[in-house]
Image (spheres, rainbow, N blue to C red):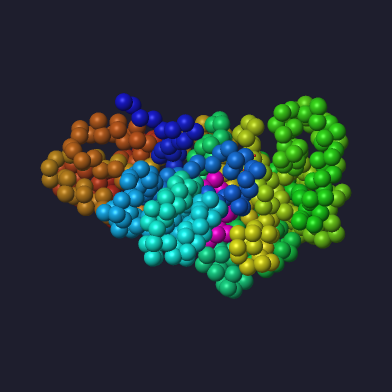
Amino acid sequence: MKFQAIKGVRDILPPDSALWNRVEQAAREVFSTYGYGEIRLPIFESAELFARSVGIETDIVNKEIYLAVEPSLATHEKDRNQLLMENTEDAPNKDAARARIDFHIELTKAGVRSGAISQQDNELILQEFANLQKNGQLLAGADWVAYVRRAKDLLSKLCYLPQLSLRPEATASVVRAYIEHGMHTRPGNVKLYYMGPMFRGERPQKGRYRQFYQIGVELLGASDHPAIDAEVIEMLLAFFERIGLKGTALSINSIGDKQCRPKYVETLRAALREVKDKLGADSQRRIETNPLRVLDSKAPDERPIIEKLPRIAEHLCDGCRNHYAELKRQLALRGVSYTENWRLVRGLDYYMRTTFEVTATGLGSQDAVCGGGRYDGLVEQLGGPAGTKGIGFAIGTDRVILSLEHQAGDAKPPAAIEVYLAWMGAAAYPAAVALAQKMRRQGTAVELPAVEMRFGKSLNLADRLGAKYAVILGDDELASKQFTVKRLADGDQKKLSESDLLSYLLPRTQ
Ligand code: ATP
Ligand code: MG
């Protein structure tokens, strides 16, 4: 049997991984200059968290979420099913059966509390169990047969199905962590960044994977001042500049708030119903489920129809209109150029007011490298302090890397090693080990062959590995304490003492 990675999932190998590291390192550096700290989040969470935040009507939760199996729950479910089949009505099995029923009740309570198993389905059943116990039937053991029948009936309805999911995005997790750790008591705005894999069961294609990577930022706090939004966007563009990503374009929009958006959505829905026949099946369905997403449609023949639809900008309430105007002023103040795109809506339920997207080149139709926006109600919606505001973005790292590679063309990534240390003769080996240690300590990347090779073969391998230099260490070098160093690009060769060699190879900071 030959194993292969799952469809839509990729390995990232060296030397390509070096570019990933460089991009991630740049994010750490740039974000920290704006006062952000890294949050490391779990890869899986209770499925309910995403249903409540991202929204059940979204593709992400509706179609694309990966459910994860909780191993202990699978075992317990088996035990429960077995218990249901056993004869527990006879007196000799009474105590054991009672203990097992109790165990499953306690287990379910704990599971519901921790969010590991579904709350909605189980809470009612647990309530009925509590009533059953209160009625005294269990404690008095008065009517065992009636009790055990009723208890088994309830047990059969308990839901042990896995209710964990691999995260499709991380904003929900950040907000969950913010609430769980009472981070609102920290001084000032809470500024966090994260990086790591996300999972969505989409159709794999270039720039769209089932395990993909995001670098994201969230700012949570009491204020929704547009200067905050503008600084977040400024920081995002500073990051793209730092990694040298060219051809980026920023689009912005305001999608209103709780006050004005619902009214606009109804206006839009009414207008869409009138042109329903001219739209494709996806858009037709979205008229009812999520009309804003129709604006986002990529179908070329729908474009002229969409152009004529009512626009949110004309339906913003005063609060949102002022917020948006101030955002634009704040962006201009920071020298950030943008285009306004009234069709820009985010796919997730929780966004409001400021939304933005950055596209890059060399990516074909999957050209969005970052999406972001404000989500002022989300903290409260997930049970956190009322009035907490939030804004953030998520960068699609895979696409950023693709775009950087496209930009670099055929330019080769830098080789992993700088020096190939070719040694010959048993006496030379200990000296080579010691020299390699000294070079590595000063930051030079060294390849030290484990077994002796002829110099010709060594130099050939050094060349194929992309090494910049070969250092030669044989009996002559050992006796004279002068090492031969050869620059492989042009064959330039010198003999240097150990200390001269080390400083010759010293990594230059620029
Ligand atoms: P798209 O419209 O491209 O599907 P999205 O609106 O679903 O993007 P978000 O959920 O806002 O994307 O995620 C932010 C960024 O993450 C996107 O701009 C994109 O760069 C990246 N991204 C999203 N889904 C994928 C995926 N399946 N594979 C690779 N990158 C992705
Ligand atoms: Mg998507």
Percent from the top left, x then y, of residue 166?
A: 49, 46
Q: Please tell me whether residue 333 is drawn above or below residue 427 in the rendered image.
A: below
Q: Which quadrant does the N terminus fall into?
A: top left
Percent from the top left, x then y, of residue 266?
A: 82, 45
For the point 28% across and 45% down, the residue is 495
Q: Please tell me whether residue 346 is drawn above or below residue 134 in the rendered image.
A: above
Q: Is residue 442 left or right of residue 220?
A: left
Percent from the top left, x then y, of residue 200?
A: 54, 40
Q: Is residue 222 left or right of residue 313?
A: left
Residue pushed farthest left? 426
For the point 30% across and 31% down, the residue is 460
Total numbered labels: 0
- Compare residues 489 and 160 and report the one nearer the observer: 160
Residue 436 appearing in the image: yes
Percent from the top left, x then y, of residue 45?
A: 49, 52
Q: What range is drawn magenta here?
A: 166-177
- Compare residues 384 and 354 and report the one nearer the observer: 384
Question: In the image, is residue 172 part of the stretch drawn in magenta?
Answer: yes
- Compare residues 171 and 161 and report the one nearer the observer: 161
Residue 155 appearing in the image: no
Question: In the image, is residue 186 part of the stretch drawn in magenta?
Answer: no
Residue pushed farthest front? 143
For the point 70% across and 49% down, the residue is 356
For the point 54% across and 42% down, the residue is 65
Q: Is residue 301 left or right of residue 105?
A: right
